[in-house]
Image (cartoon, rainbow, N blue to C red):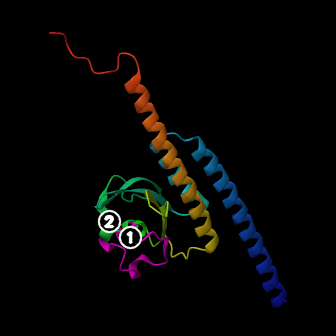
Amino acid sequence: MRARDAGAGRIVAGMRDGEAAQVGVEGLLQAVQQLCAARDLGKVIDIVRTSARRLVSADGAAFVLPEGDLVYYAAEDAIGPLWAGRRFPASTCISGWAMQHRQCVTIEDIRLDARVPQDAYLPTFVRSLAMIPVNLAQPVAAIGVYWARQHQTSEAELQLLQALADATATAVMNAARACSSRWTRARSAPGRGIRVAAR
């Protein structure tokens, strides 16, 4: 009886894993479609911060931008306040580390990793995290996802987040092109040039 119960438990767990994977793929496809239509960085950031959290059932997500020697936490979607609107030295922040080393980072227990600035993290709900650079070859941002409980990021979760980061990289470039195009049209519009008063 116990063996049969254990086997049934594995089947149910497998079904749940399959359902979770299906939900993740569907969520990723929806996010990619939304990103394809986004034409400004603010919209891209909004899509990514909500999608990243939902894709892996995380308790929080953040969109981080590099600013020289700093990183800027541009936006977040979380169960409690994180660092939206704040800047930190890239050299002492895990998002900066991920972008500088061009590597995805997963940390099961933030208290045990020297790369995590404890004074910034301990006041928050965060216990585990994953940090994914956007455009590994030359990072233009990073996506952070956070869990309030100790969580080991699975390979499937990492693949979903990496796929989202890849789509985000394209969306960021498209938004930059759209912004440049709008600026060019505004400059060339009649009456928009610089006028010099006649003497």
Percent position of residue 169, x then y = 52, 54
Q: Quadrant of the C terminus?
A: top left
Check residue 153 for magenta coloring: no
Name the foreground residue: 91 vs 78.
Answer: 91
**Left or right: 158 in relation to 22:** left
Name the foreground residue: 7 vs 22.
Answer: 22
* Residue 56 seen in the figure: no
Question: Looking at the image, is 83 positioned above or below residue 121?
Answer: above
Q: Secondary structure at mark 1?
A: helix
Q: Which residues are magenta?
A: 100-124
| Res 112 → quadrant | bottom left
Q: Residue at x 30, y 71 (%)?
A: 119
Q: Quadrant of the N terminus?
A: bottom right
Check residue 120 for magenta coloring: yes
- Kind of residue sitting beneath label 1: Trp
Q: Residue at x 54, y 75 (%)?
A: 151
Percent position of residue 160, x then y = 61, 63
- Kind of residue sitting beneath label 2: Ala
Circle 2 packing at 10 Å, graded few (<14), some (14-19), many (20+), is many
Instruction: Give the residue pinned by disc 1.
Output: 97
Alpha carbon distance from label 1 to label 2 = 7 Å
Q: Secondary structure at mark 2?
A: helix
Which numbered dot is residue 122?
none
Percent position of residue 69, x then y = 28, 62
Percent position of residue 89, x then y = 28, 64
| Res 198 → quadrant | top left
Circle 1 packing at 10 Å, graded few (<14), some (14-19), many (20+), is some
* Residue 39 seen in the figure: yes
**Left or right: 199 in relation to 190:** left
Instruction: Give the residue pinned by disc 2.
Output: 90
